[in-house]
Image: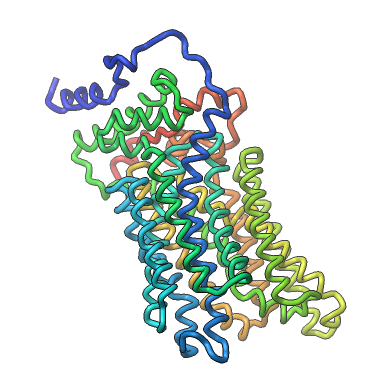
């Protein structure tokens, strides 16, 4: 037996379930734990990290109450028109910059520690907002929130995938976007009750509370095992599965250890470099899937509609006041997100994604057709204005019911452990870049193509997007991370959702994510 084999055997022995310790002995048959007890710690862990996303949502919604105050006849801070445009977009431009470093930092420090540290710049930004007396201080606060929003992408998305069980992962992942939208709504509500400076002070409550709760939850067991901290990983896994004895997580723990051990053995034996993981199909195929979902979600029309809702409802002669229509649209977004969180466990991702894209496309087509009829004088602007109004509010609900949440859910589960952190940061940066571009070109498109023509473009993107999604999106709901990675390696096919009787068997693979076995052809490319 050569040195390589001895090294592999040493790694294997170090990462087996530590049965020699007194409190981890094999005992009698393990007593099943109730589903509610298993789910409770996972909900608590995801809820703690969602507070960080809620804080980020507050930074996005804060501009909604800040800009009107700066545009008053006698504002507290004198700003030019050019400065106002930067205040409305500076944080969005910087989010992709933060995303690029997000994966590297969370991979080095750990998911939980990274999230804990990122609460500090949010608190500093709110303090800076409160004491701002010129536009430069506002720019600094905006830049801080934008970069922090990018840096939090990888840890929050990978953490939920690595600590949750397959049957809960989709539903709990979907709460991420809901938390951001809730943060935006909190700003709108608070801004109607008090001044923006007071709101800035109140907003500090959320990152402080988030930091405290993050101190009470464990680190990702998967990350701990990667770093060789085996006892801490076992303790974390016991906590996450319902504060159970070690015997309850024996099989899952060994499976996770095996999944981490295999790629390390391959790298040690073959001298494989880290960058080679980014040349395999297990990286670029899911990267294309998530990128395409982002592109369809933004260029399908909802991002510019959300940004320019007031003017859009005005041009369509909405039967209700423009700002009220915008509020109804925001409520529809929140309701759609909540519906996705509740139903995704029962329907799976494919049904929700395809129905969301196609129905949103129909809604924009209805609004576009109505705009064409107005241009040709076939209908009066006020006669049937409720049709496009309801169609666009319906689009807000239907898009957030599926396609707007889909890429954020997929990020945490389609990438292998070797690339997950970096891939999550990079693809999130692409998503924010899409949002920035589609908002930037909206006014030019509307002036050159008319509002109806712009809506037809969004409908066309949705139609093509649905066709592509139909062929490239596997059903990952209820699947283990191992099965998902084997699918992208070409050794397993996820055609349908797993049968209900198969789910208990899959639970022992809950957070496992081994490097998939690839065929000889791919390994030689």
How many numbered discs sit on the rendered protein? Answer: 0
Looking at the picture, the colour scheme in use is rainbow
Which residue is at a point 58% across and 58% down the rendered structure image?
A: 182
Left or right? Give the position of 473 relative to 423: right
Above or below 290: residue 306: below
| Position in image of residue 403 (x %, y %) | 60, 55
**Could you say which quadrant of the image residue 414 lies in?**
top left
| Position in image of residue 304 (x %, y %) | 59, 72
Above or below 343: residue 499: above
Left or right? Give the position of 276 relative to 402: left
Above or below 165: residue 79: below
Q: Nearer the viewer, residue 99 or 458?
A: 99
**Could you say which quadrant of the image residue 93 lies in?**
bottom left
Above or below 109: residue 192: below
| Farthest residue, direction left | 3
Q: Nearer the viewer, residue 365 or 417?
A: 417
| Position in image of residue 522 (x %, y %) | 34, 41
Query: From where the camera sits, is residue 115 visible?
Result: yes
| Farthest residue, direction top | 28
Query: From where the camera sits, is residue 289 visible?
Result: no
The quadrant the C terminus occupies is top left
Which residue is at a point 69% across and 62% down the rendered structure image?
A: 395
Q: Nearer the viewer, residue 94 or 523?
A: 94
The quadrant the N terminus occupies is top left
Q: Nearer the viewer, residue 491 or 294?
A: 294
């Amino acid at each position: 037996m050569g040195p390589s084999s001895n090294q592999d055997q040493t790694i294997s022995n170090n990462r087996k379930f530590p049965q020699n310790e007194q409190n981890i002995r094999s005992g009698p048959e393990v007593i099943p734990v109730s589903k509610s007890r298993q789910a409770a710690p996972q909900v608590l862990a995801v809820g703690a990290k969602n507070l960080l996303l809620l804080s980020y949502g507050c930074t996005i919604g804060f501009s909604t109450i800040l800009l009107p105050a700066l545009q008053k006849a006698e504002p507290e801070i004198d700003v030019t028109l050019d400065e106002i445009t930067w205040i409305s977009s500076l944080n969005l431009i910087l989010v992709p910059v933060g995303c690029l470093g997000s994966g590297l930092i969370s991979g080095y420090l750990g998911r939980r520690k990274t999230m804990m540290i990122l609460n500090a710049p949010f608190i500093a930004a709110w303090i800076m907002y409160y004491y701002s007396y010129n536009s430069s201080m506002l720019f600094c606060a905006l830049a801080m929130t934008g970069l922090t929003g990018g840096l939090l992408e990888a840890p929050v998305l990978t953490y939920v995938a690595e600590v949750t069980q397959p049957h809960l992962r989709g539903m709990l992942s979907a709460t991420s976007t809901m938390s951001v939208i809730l943060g935006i709504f909190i700003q709108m509500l608070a801004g109607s009750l008090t001044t923006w400076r007071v709101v800035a002070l109140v907003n500090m409550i959320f990152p402080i509370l988030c930091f405290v709760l993050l101190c009470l939850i464990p680190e990702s067991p998967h990350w701990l095992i990667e770093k060789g901290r085996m006892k801490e990983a076992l303790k974390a896994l016991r906590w996450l599965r319902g504060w159970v004895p070690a015997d309850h997580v024996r099989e899952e723990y060994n499976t996770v250890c095996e999944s981490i051990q295999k790629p390390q053995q391959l790298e040690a034996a073959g001298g494989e470099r880290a960058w080679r993981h980014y040349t395999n199909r297990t990286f670029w195929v899911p990267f294309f899937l998530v990128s395409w979902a982002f592109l369809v979600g933004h260029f399908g029309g909802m991002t510019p509609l959300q940004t320019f809702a007031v003017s859009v409802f005005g041009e369509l002669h909405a039967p209700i006041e423009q700002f009220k229509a915008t509020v109804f649209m925001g409520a529809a977004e929140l309701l759609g997100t909540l519906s996705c969180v509740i139903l995704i466990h029962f329907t799976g991702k494919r049904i929700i994604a395809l129905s969301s894209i196609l129905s949103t496309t129909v809604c924009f087509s209805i609004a576009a057709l109505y705009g064409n009829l107005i241009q040709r004088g076939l209908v009066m602007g006020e006669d049937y204005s409720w049709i496009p109004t309801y169609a666009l509010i319906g689009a807000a609900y239907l898009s957030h019911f599926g396609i707007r949440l889909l890429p954020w859910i997929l990020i945490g589960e389609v990438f292998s452990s070797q690339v997950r952190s970096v891939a999550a940061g990079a693809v999130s940066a692409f998503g924010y870049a899409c949002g920035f571009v589609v908002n930037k070109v909206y006014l030019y498109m509307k002036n050159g193509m008319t509002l109806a023509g712009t809506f037809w473009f969004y409908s066309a993107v949705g139609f093509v997007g649905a066709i592509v999604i139909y062929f490239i999106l596997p059903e990952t709901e209820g699947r283990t991370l191992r099965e998902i990675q084997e699918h992208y390696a070409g050794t397993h096919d996820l055609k349908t959702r797993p049968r209900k009787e198969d789910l208990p068997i899959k639970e022992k693979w809950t957070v496992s994510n081994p490097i998939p076995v690839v065929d000889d052809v791919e390994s030689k490319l």
